Amino acid sequence: MVQSRTHNCGELRMENVGESVVLAGWLENMREVGSGLSFVVLRDFYGTTQIVLETEEMVSRFKAITKESTIQVKGTVRERSSKNPKQATGDIEVVPESVEVLGRCRYNELPFEINHSREADETARLKYRYLDLRNPEVKNNIILRCNVVAALRQSMTEHGFLEITTPILTASSPEGARDYLVPARKHPGKFYALPQAPQQFKQLLMTAGFDRYFQIAPCFRDEDARGDRSPGEFYQLDMEMAFATQEDVFAVLEDVLPPIFAKYGKYNRASEAPFMRIPYLEAMEKYGTDKPDLRIDLTVQDVTDTLADCGFGPFATVVSAEMAEKSGGALTEGTELDTHIKAVVISDFKESRKFIDKTIGDVEVQAGNKAYWFRMDENGELVGGISKFVAPIKDSVVSALSLKAGDLVVLSSGKLSQAQKTAGVIVKTFGAAVPGHMDKEQYTFCWIVDFPMYEIGEESGELEFCHNPFSMPSGGLETLLKAERGEIDPLSITADQYDLVCNGVELSSGAVRNHDPEIMIKAFEMVRLGEDDVKSKFPAMYNAFCYGAPPHAGIAPGVDRMVMLLAGEDSIREIIPFPMNKNAQDVMMGAPGFVTDRQLEELHIKVTEKETEENG
């Protein structure tokens, strides 16, 4: 077989001038300049090389080849008379002696221009993803992903972790999201589940005596898509450590991640260890979110006591006579309302009223709640927005918020969680939009710690686990017993649980695990689940812990989100080789799709309502 190429398309330099070479790649473009002279761009994985055509015969042969066909070119390297310093091979060109079509593109029209594929409709990009990936910008994101994963593996191995793969077909487990179920052919009526995470397996490895485990773990959750979450399948750097505390986990990640972000990140600045630690309740009060973007210098202040009696209806903390009358008897005058008022002060604000209205609108769309504003003009007067309600108590407002001329104040109100969430969106939206309040080109890490162990469920109205039920309650069994005896409020119990946040994106959740069966049972009893429930829902882990489990802790940073941040992308689909669309469909492969009746019969499944392709 003839050698398909002697060099790749990103390799030739001035030292190759005069050599006979063989190149192979895709015909990206052909540009005719007249008088039998044309230029061809040949592209492969490594780069591009200019091919210069100087005879009518050679021009004719190349014109017969459709764009994006794969070709082999044999020729001689020479120095270019007009060099291109922006191109790695811009000092040379190849004069061809022959050209051979290796794989013809049978379409004269492409779905989109390869080098401008990111400007195309997303559906077209996903349907023709193999063409989209030919775009160097898209391809480079996948290369970045490969390099980051390799670096993570190397670093974890150097830190003494063993890479161990865990099962893909497992049992369904109540871990917060919907499972993907797989029917078991040999066990009619029973199903496997794809793992939402290797949570139980990695804890079982600790119980089995393995000291440090990791893997680049595939996880499967049937959940809706968003910018930083892909539906269906995602990957995480899953890790667990025996005889470890929260501090041990922090030390490992603070040693592993900064060098990778420094080497591969779009920005050349990153937080140094130790990362800032922010208790959950403080994060919600100060930033309005448990995923703060510390590149933004804006924070939230509580002004409930200051503005509650200003006369503005949404700020009222007690039902007035007017409110009671308007409610038609639904409210009683004097009743206390669960209203909290949060304020974000934006200093040195010089933008227009139109800018304010637009940005307030963006906040309300994202938060699903109203936002309000006023500002202090250059004369020290409160103007605009709801200023007529605030002006009569100007002195107390100025004092409470330390206002000065040029400040804009944006406010939220409602129940505590609602007011906090809206304030968090205000910080994020105005911080990014108003010049001078966001130092964007850096990576800022922080740990969110001391998460609540329990919360009151919105639907049930009863005590439920707030996050991971496998987390160790701070204070262990004694804390749970105090709550059981009524000595402390169960909602005051915190868990030895932590989140790693970077630039406002949650990279991962982790925890010191509840490895003691007695503590585990008591933790579940708090949410009305007894010992039998624990044994039935988590039989392997419960039984294993009864054989002497070591204290252990772990975490699992999301690889997809990590690479998204490193690449500076806003959508996680840009760094996944073959992503699904927002509706969890693979439009390229046609998944999900119908299967044959015979396949269903083998699996003992009957479809009772089969949607058509048109409405499915």
Image (tube, rainbow, N blue to C red):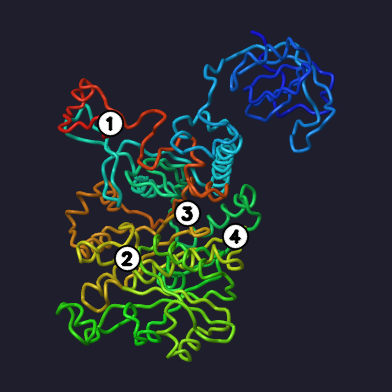
- Mark 4, Cα crowd under 10 Å, few <14 / some 14-19 / many 20+, is some
Residue where numbered disc 4 is placed:
440
Task: For mark 4, give the secondary structure.
Answer: loop
Q: Position of residue 93 (x, y in %)?
A: 78, 24
Q: Earlier in the sequence, mark 4 or mark 2?
A: 4
Amino acid type at mark 4:
Lys
Residue where numbered disc 3 is placed:
507
The answer to whether residue 168 is left or right of residue 439 is: left
Residue where numbered disc 2 is placed:
453
Q: How many marks?
A: 4
Task: For mark 2, give the secondary structure.
Answer: loop
Which of the pair 545/234 is nearer the observer?
A: 234
Amino acid type at mark 3:
Leu
Q: Position of residue 186 (x, y in %)?
A: 21, 27
Amino acid type at mark 2:
Met
The image quadrant that residue 147 belongs to is top right
Amino acid type at mark 1:
Glu
Q: Residue at x 34, y 67 (%)?
A: 452
* Label 4 close to label 2 by CB (< 8 Å): no
